[in-house]
Image (cartoon, coloured by chain):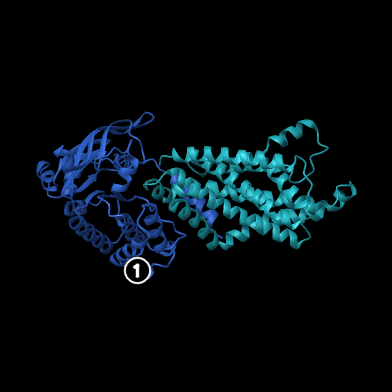
Chain colours: A cyan, B blue
Amino acid sequence: MGTIYIMWLRELKRFWRSKARVIGSLAQPVLFLVALGFGLGPIFQQAGGGNYIEFLAPGIIGMSILFSAMFMGIQVIWDREFGFLKETLVAPVSRYRIMLGRTLGGATVASIQGLLVLAISMLIGFMPKSLVMIPVAVVFMFMIAVLFTALGTAIASKLEDMQGFQLIINFVIMPLFFLSGALFPVDNLPNAFKVIIQIDPLSYGIDGLRAAFTGLAHLGLLLDLFVLASLTIIATVIGSYLFSKIEV
Amino acid sequence: MEKTEENIIEVKNLIKKFGNFTAVDNISFNVKKGEVFAFLGPNGAGKTTTIKILTTLLHPTSGNVIVNGFSPVTNQDKVRHSFGIVFQDPSLDDELTAYENMEFHAVLYGIKPNAIKDRITELLKLVELWDRRNDLVKTFSGGMKRRLEIARGLIHHPKILFLDEPTLGLDPQTRNFLWEYIKNMSKKEDMTVFLTTHYMEEADRIADRIAVIDNGKIIEIGPPGKLKKDTKSKTLEDAFLKLTGHNIREESASVKDHMRLHRRMWTRR
């Protein structure tokens, strides 16, 4: 227990001390919310989609969690080259615990970022339908966060250095985001595209967030919950396994 | 049986290959309990690889290794409890304070919560960092970081202390301070010290025995005096050069340099 807690605490302390980074990481989601929300809002409304900000905000919250969580996971590479990883790898504790502590810490940080984006989106006009469902939304946020921190850790455990970083952004993070239904309704899309969206794990997270916040789900809250929880467990298991095999 | 009690580290026919490259080529040696043992060799000789194998970070390709009576391959936790280590590259968390780095280590090594504060206080005072305990490590100089790492490596009272070029880039004052401290510690606690260094006069002064390693093989092993006598050299440096030749070694690096650049790009704001 001590190991998991101290790893978790480390991530939170680092987060708390790097306020510049926190603000930096909020810039992108805010830009998306404002530019897309206000820019495409009128067209969305004319097409009968309703209030676009309402539709968009859960997607952008999901996006900010996806980005933060993946970066938190990928930080294993930094720790590896800058030595701190070795300090944890020679310690007489199970590497699974170290991985779990890191992941929970990273996921907590990513969830906090998600909550900050929620607060900002409420400032510019987003209003959750029911307050009772907010805890459900928080559960979804945390699951998205754990899933992608674990995925980031898994990828980083197999990478030697940051050379592949750009590849991860362009071939993993960006597709996960754009093909998740975060920005547009899925209902009237071509079937092939729908299939792709159903393969994307983030789709379930964002659909779940949307269901909790606005009551509008494409896939259904229970299905979202089930798929997301399963994938989170699978990613954590794979991530811990790969992390435990790191040689430095 | 008696032999294992005397030797705290036993290495027999150790081989480590990375693909086609043989980093450690069939070496055997023992380190006695309480001894200060130095590993000397040019860049890329296999020193760090050997330390990584002894400290469970790498698996050997073949051969037998025993550290404090346990195998680093099959009994990792027991081995990990036995040693403290100061790595060649800094391994502190820059974003944490000196005290937090120490505390982190103490928790990972299962030190009882009521003992943590006393031990950290004692060690930080010993390495003269107590006044800076609440400062972030990123504000520390290289020498201060080294002192902190050594203090950290000693929190759990290890039987063996591994030091991989611990004095690289430090001024003579700090080096002197560190070695004096380590030597006293080794005597007082009967702690074995396994070190590598490029400073020959340091090795000459500190080490009870020295192994000269080159191209993954141990060329010569014995007390500093014997090495000098065998090679008919006045200084250990001359003995070293006679044993390993004058060629300058290339070490493959660059991945790390890349990382440094990236990190600077990402953390500067």
Q: Quadrant of residue A191?
A: top right
Q: Quadrant of residue B186?
A: bottom left
Horizontal side of A97 relative to A62 (left or right) equals left
Name the spot of residue B120 as percent of width and height, x first: 34, 63
Residues B249 and A218: in front is A218
Chain containing the residue with disc 1: B
Q: State the quadrant of the C terminus of chain A.
A: top left
**Residue found farthest to the bottom:** B131
Examine the rendered structure and indicate whether residue A109 appears above or below residue B140.
above
Examine the rendered structure and indicate whether residue A79 appears above or below residue B181.
above
Horizontal side of A213 relative to B202 (left or right) equals right
**Residue found farthest to the front:** A132
Name the spot of residue A73 as percent of width and height, x first: 54, 47
Name the spot of residue A27 as percent of width and height, x first: 67, 58
Amino acid carrying mark 1 in the image: Trp
Q: Residues within 10 Å of mark 1 (few under 14, many from 20)?
A: some
- Residue shown at 31% from the left, 57% from the top: B155
Question: Is any part of residue A228 visible from this angle?
Answer: yes
Name the spot of residue B210 as percent of width and height, x first: 18, 45
> In terms of secondary structure, where does tag 1 sit?
helix
- Circle 1 is placed at which residue position? B130
Horizontal side of B153 relative to A177 (left or right) equals left
